Amino acid sequence: MTNLVRRCVYTLHFVAASIVGGLLLPVISAAALTIALVRGPKGHAAVFAARTYSRVMQRVLGWRIEAEGVERLASISPSVVMVRHQSNLDVIVVGEVFPPGAIAIGKKQLEWIPLFGWLWRATGNILIDRRNTAVAMESIRRAAESAKAVGVSVWVAPEGHRNMGAEMLPFKKGVFHLALGAQFPILPLAVSPLSAVLDARRWILRPGTIRLRVLPPVPTAGLGPGDLDELMARVRSDLANAQRELAPGAGEPILPSPRGASVEGARA
C-alpha cells in the first residue's frame, strides 16, 4: 500500500472515529450522570462512564490496550496516580483501568463540555484554573485535604499540559504538594507513546496496541517540602524509564512527515 493510499485510509479512520466519539460522549455522560444523581454511589458512575466509553472506542479506533500492574490501583489506595497527558484520547486508555472511588484533577475548561462537564463535577472530580496560580494551588490544597479525609485516590497529570513528545515537560510542583500534604504514596502510570498510532495535527489514526504499566509506589510518608525536588526527580525517572521499556523503537511518525513538520508536538 502506497503512502498516499495509507494516508487516505488513516485520515478517513480519524474522521469517522472523531464523529463516533463526539456523538458517544454525551450519550454515555448522560447515562452516567443519571446514575450519579439518582442511584449512586458516585464512584460507580465514573467507572461506568470510563469503562463504557473506553471499550466502545477501542473497537472504533482499532486499539488494543495491554495493562500491567493494575492490581496496585486497588491494593495501594488511597494514592496519587500520576500519568502523562498525551492526547484528548487519553480517556480511552486510562478509562480501561480507572478504579471505583477515584477522582481526577482537570482544567476548568472541561466544565463547559455539555453533559461531560456536569458529570465531572457530579462524580467529585476537581477543576482548576491554570491561568491563576494562587487559585489553582488553593484548589489543590483543598483537594489534598478532601482526599485525605475521605480516603480516595487522586489522578493527576504531572506535566500539566498535553504533550505527545518523547521528552517530558517540566513537572508541576502543585501535584507533588498534594501528595506530600495528604501523605499519599505516588503511583506512576506509564503509557506507551500514542504517536505510534495517532497524529491529530495531520488527521491520521491507525489501529495498534497501547501498553500501560502501573509502577511500584513512591512513598511520601514522613516527607515534607524539603524533599520535593528529590521526589519529583524520582517520579520523572521512573516514568521515563518505563515509557522506554513499554515502547522500544515506538513513537515514530505514522507516515513520513512533510519537510519541516514535527510529529512530536502533535496534539489531540
Image (tube, rainbow, N blue to C red):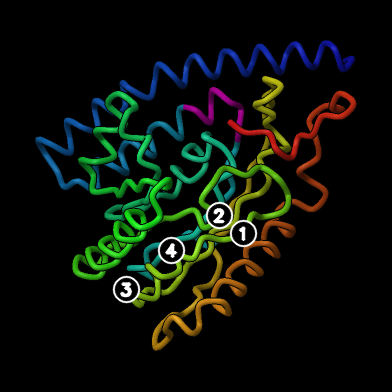
| Residue closest to the far bottom | 222
Determine which residue is flagged by label 1.
Answer: 170
In the rendered structure, does residue 244 fall within the stretch colored magenta?
no
Residue in the picture at 50% in, 83% down: 227
Q: Which mark is residue 159?
A: 2
> Which span is picked out in magenta?
57-63
Report the residue at 66% width, 49% height from top.
Answer: 192
Decide: marks 2, 1 in contact (CB < 8 A)?
yes
Q: Which residue is mark 3?
A: 182
- Residue 219 place in picture, x, y as percent: 46, 80
**Image point 39% across, 76% down: which residue?**
180
Q: Earlier in the sequence, mark 2 or mark 1?
A: 2
Sequence-wise, which precedes: disc 3 or disc 4? 4
Q: Which sits earlier in the primary sequence, circle 2 or circle 4?
A: 2
Three-letter code for the amino acid on which mark 4 is drawn: Gly
CA gap, disc 3 to disc 4? 12 Å
